[in-house]
Amino acid sequence: MLRPGTHHRGGFVTTLDAATLRLLERLRPESLPPETGDVPVVAPRRIEEAAEVLAFAGDRGIVVGFIGGASRFDLGGRLEPDVWLSTSAMNRIVDHQVEDLTLVVQAGASVADVEALLADHGQSAILPEAPGSATVGGVVATGASGYRRLRYGPTRDRVLEVVLATGYGKVVRAGGRVVKNVTGYDLSRLAVGSMGALGLIGEVCLKLWPIPRGAATVRIDDPEGALAETYRPLAVLETEGGAAVYLTGTPEQVAAQSDELGGVAEPGHRWPDPIDTAMRFSVRVAPRHLAGAVRMILTAFPEAPLRAQHGVGELTFGLETCDPEDVVAVRHWAEGHGGAMVVLAAPPGSLPGVDPWGTPPVAHGLQVRVKEAFDPHRICNPGKLPGGL
Amino acid sequence: MLQAMDLIAELEGVVGSDRVRAHPLDRRVFAKDSGVKTGPVAAVVFPESAEETARCVRIARNAGVPVVPRGAGTGLAGGAVPIEPSVLMVMTRMNRIVEVDEVSRSAWVGPGLINLDLSRDLASTGLHFAPDPSSQQSCTIGGNVGTNAGGPHCLAEGTTVAHILAIEMVTAEGDVVVVGGDHPDPVGLDLRAVVVGSEGTMGIVTRVLVKLTETPPAVRTLLIGFPTVEDAAATVSDVIASGLVPAALEMMDQAMVCAVENFVHAGYPTDAAAVLLAEVAGHGVGVAAEADMIARIAAGNHASTVRLAKDETERALLWKGRKSAFGAIAQSAPDYYLHDTVVPRTRLVEVLSKIYEIGERYGISLLNVFHAGDGNLHPLVSFDSAVPGELDRVLAAAEEMVRVSIEAGGSLSGEHGIGMEKRDLMGLVFGPDDLDAQARLREAFDADGVLNPGKILPEGSRCFDRAPTIGAAS
Ligand SMILES: Cc1cc2nc3c(=O)[nH]c(=O)nc-3n(C[C@H](O)[C@H](O)[C@H](O)COP(=O)(O)OP(=O)(O)OC[C@H]3O[C@@H](n4cnc5c(N)ncnc54)[C@H](O)[C@@H]3O)c2cc1C
C-alpha cells in the first residue's frame, strides 16, 4: 500500500502527495507486469484518463513510463519512472470495417488476439509474426515491423489514425479512418517509432490487407539470387539454419513461383522462431550491404542465432554474453556502411559504455524541438530515444 | 528591413542575375499554381544547389520576407501560392538523377526532376517510381513530396510517403539537414514521415532518396461499362471486399467519358452511365485469374461491356483516356475546379449520389473521374470565371461536397493537400486540441513563420498567443 511522503527508489526520490495517491488508487490495474517492480502502476480505461494523469504529472514533474506487453521493455535508454502508465485496461477492438479493410483498436489489445480475429476474415494488419505478449500500441510506439515488410512495407505505412495523450496532457487525434489522406500534418506517422516520446498512444486505426489463399515456403541456397529473380516475394529470410523464400498469391501463382525457384517447397509460411538469447541486436543497412552484414556476423559470432531480411536490410542476432568491444565493432561496421546497430535487449549493466542506439540522427536539433513540443516537461519516457531524448 | 531592390541584389549575389526574376510579368506567371487562387510574389529564384538554397533562405529570413518552395506549379490547393509577398524558390533546375542503386532499389534525385522522367529513365532496369499522379508528365518529385501525391497505382503501392527513404532539405534557419536514411528504421523520431506532405512548410527539399519498385512482369487492363453509377460503385466496393487488391481501380462517369472520347478517341463506351478502368499486375499466372474475377464481379453488378486490353498499345490507349481527363475538360470550359475528398470505400454509392444532387441544386456542370479503389473522389466542375458570381457558386458547392464526404466518415483531401484552398475547412475534421498539436509540430520546424506561412493550418490554431510571422511583422 502506498503512503503519502517521500519514497526512495534506485537513487531517485519521489514525492507522492495525497492527490497523486488518490489518482493512483483510482486507476490501479488488476494485475501488475513484473517489469514494473515496486513502482506504482496506473491503468487508465480511456484515453482521457491517460491525458488527465499526464497533465497531473506534468504539473508536478512526475516522470511517467509507458508500458504495454513489455515485450520490448529493454529497447532504448533505461527508464526510471515515478509511475508506470499501462495500456492493459485499454484493449478493446473499437471498429472493424471488414469490407473497407480498416481496423480501429485500442493500444493495449494484444497483437496475437487482433491477428487471430482478422485471420477469421481472411485479413491481416501485417503486424510482427511472433508477437509474444506485444500489444498493438507497443508495436506502433516502437515502430516494429514483421518479416512481411518486404512485400507490404513497414508498419508505418498502415497506421492511418492515432489518438494520443500528449505530454502536456491533451487528447489529440491525427490522421483519419480512410486509406488515403493528406489532411494536415500527419502526426500518426510521427507517432510510429516515437518510443513514447510524444505521449501515450491510446488508439490506432490500421489499414488491413486481404490474405491471398496461396502460401509456400521454399528453401533455397542463394537468397540474393532468389530475391533478384522472384517477383515480389513476401520475404527472403536467412537464418543460422539456412535460407528461404516466402511466397504468397493465388495458389496457381505460388505453385508456378515455387517451380521457378526450384528449391524444396512446403505449403504455408513457417516463420523462424524468435531469438530468445539474453542479448539481442539489430543491424540495419541499405539492402545492398545485407549479405556483407551476414558474413560479418557469422565471422564474429559463429554460434549466434540470426535472422537476416534480404531486400529489407535488417539483420537481428542474439548472444548470451559478450565483450562490449565486439558489439562496438559491429556498430562501427554498420555505421561505417551508413546504417545503424541497435541494442534490442540486454540485461542491465551487461554492456557498459554501449549506447542502445549509437550515433544520434544528423538532424538532432529538430528531434529535440519536436520532443519539446509534445513533452514540454520531459515526463514521457524521458531518455528512451537516441541522444538521451 | 531590406528594401525590395536590396533583397533582389542580395539574392543575385548568390545565384547570379540570370536566376533571379522580379519583372512584373514573372511575378504574374508565378503568382498562381494550377488551382484558382493567386498571391503576391517578391522575387523568383532558381537555385541549383542546396547550398544556394540555404543562402537564399538566410537572406530572405534576415529581410523578413517569407520563402515559398515551388516545383512545377501543378498543385491544385494553392500550396505554392504565396499569401504574403514572398521569395519563390523554384526548384526545377535541380532535376538530376544523382545516383541509382539497383540492388538496394533506391535513387537519389533532385527535387526538380519530373516524376515521369524518373520512371522513363529507369525503364531498362525493370524498376520504376510507383507514385503516378495524373500530372506525372509535368509535376516534380519535390512537389510530390510536398503534397504526398497519389495516383492510380497508389491503390496497391501506397502514396508518395511509402516511397521516400530520406530527404535532404534546407530548414527555416537556412541549415542543410538530412532526415531518414537508406537503411530500414533509422533511429530517432521519423521526421521524414511528416516532412512528406508538409507542403513546403517544414523545409525546402533539395534532394530525395526514393524507393524504386519492381515493374510487374504481367499486367491486365480492363475497361468495364455500367448502366448506372451505382453499379460501378458497387463493383468497386465488392472488388475491395473480395480480397483482391488491384493495381488500379479508376472510375469515370458518362459526362467525363464523353469529354474524353471527344478528345482522345480511346473507344470508351459513351452510352455507359459509368466506366471502371481496372488493372491487375504481378506474376503472369496470377493476373489472368484476377482479371477474370474482376470481370465476374462486374457482371454480377450488371456490367454492360467488358473490354480487356489485348496488348500494350491498347492498354496505353485506355490509360491515355484516363490521364487526359483534365485536358479534355479544358476544351469545354475556360476554367475547371477539381475537388479531392476521401470516403470509406463502402460508402461510395451514397456519397456520389449526394454529390450529384448538390451539383444539380447549384446548377453546375459536374463530371466525375476518380481513384475509386481508394475512395478518393474528384468531382470536377467546369465553369467560366468571367461570368460574375460563377466562381463563388462553384466554391459554395465545393464546400457542401466536402461536408457530405466528412459526414460519411471521410477526410478533407486524399492527395492534393490543404494549402490555402482548404485551410479554413480544417476545423471540420479536427478539434482545437488536434490543430494545436499540428501547430506545435510546425513551430518545432519553423518557429518564425519563414517557410510558406499561412498554409495548412487556419489562423488561431495554436491555442496560446504566438508571435506574429516575420512577414506580418514587417
Ligand atoms: C491535370 C492535373 C492532374 C493531377 N493529378 C493528380 C493526381 O492524380 N494525384 C495527385 O496527388 N495530384 C495530382 N495533381 C496535383 C499536383 O500535380 C500534385 O500535387 C503534384 O505533387 C505537385 O507537384 P509540383 O511539382 O507541381 O508542385 P507545386 O505545385 O509546385 O507545389 C506543391 C506543394 O509542394 C511544395 N513544394 C514543391 N516543391 C518543393 C520542394 N522542393 N521542397 C518543399 N516543398 C516543395 C509547394 O510549396 C507546394 O506546397 C494534378 C494536377 C493537375 C493539374
Image (cartoon, coloured by chain):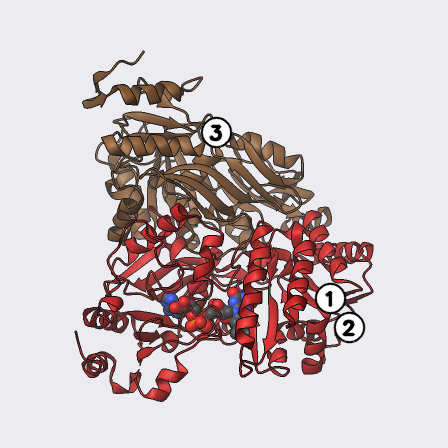
Horizontal side of A251 relative to A148 (left or right) equals right
Q: Residue flagged by tag 3: what amino acid is it?
A: Met
Colour given to chain A in the rendered image: brown
Where does the C terminus of chain A fall, quadrant-wise? top left
Residue at 39% across, 59% down: B458
Which circle marks residue B269 in the picture?
A: 2
The relative height of residue B165 versus residue A237 in the rendered view (above or below) is: below
B415 w.r.t. A66: above or below: below
- Give whichever of B151, A372 is nearer the camera: A372
Q: Is the residue marked by circle 1 packed among few (<14), some (14-19), or many (20+) residues within 10 Å?
A: many
Tell me whether the residue at label 2 lies in contact with that at label 1, contact meaning CB atoms closer than 8 angstroms: yes
The secondary element bearing badge 3 is classed as loop
Q: Which residue is mark 3?
A: A90
In the image, the chain rendered in red is B
Question: x and y percent of residue A376 in the render?
Answer: 26, 42
Could you say whether the residue bearing mark 1 is in a helix, strand or loop?
Answer: strand
Secondary structure beneath label 2: loop
Q: Output the chain of dot 2.
A: B
Mark-to-mark CA distance, 2 and 1: 8 Å
Within 8 Å of ligand 1, the CB of disc 1?
A: no
Are the residues under marks 3 and 1 on the same chain?
A: no
| Residue B406 at x, y percent in the picture | 56, 53
Q: Residue at x 67, y 40 (%)?
A: A122
The picture quadrant where one finds residue B166 is: bottom left
Residue receiving disc 1: B275
Residue sitting nearer the eye, A276 or B331: B331
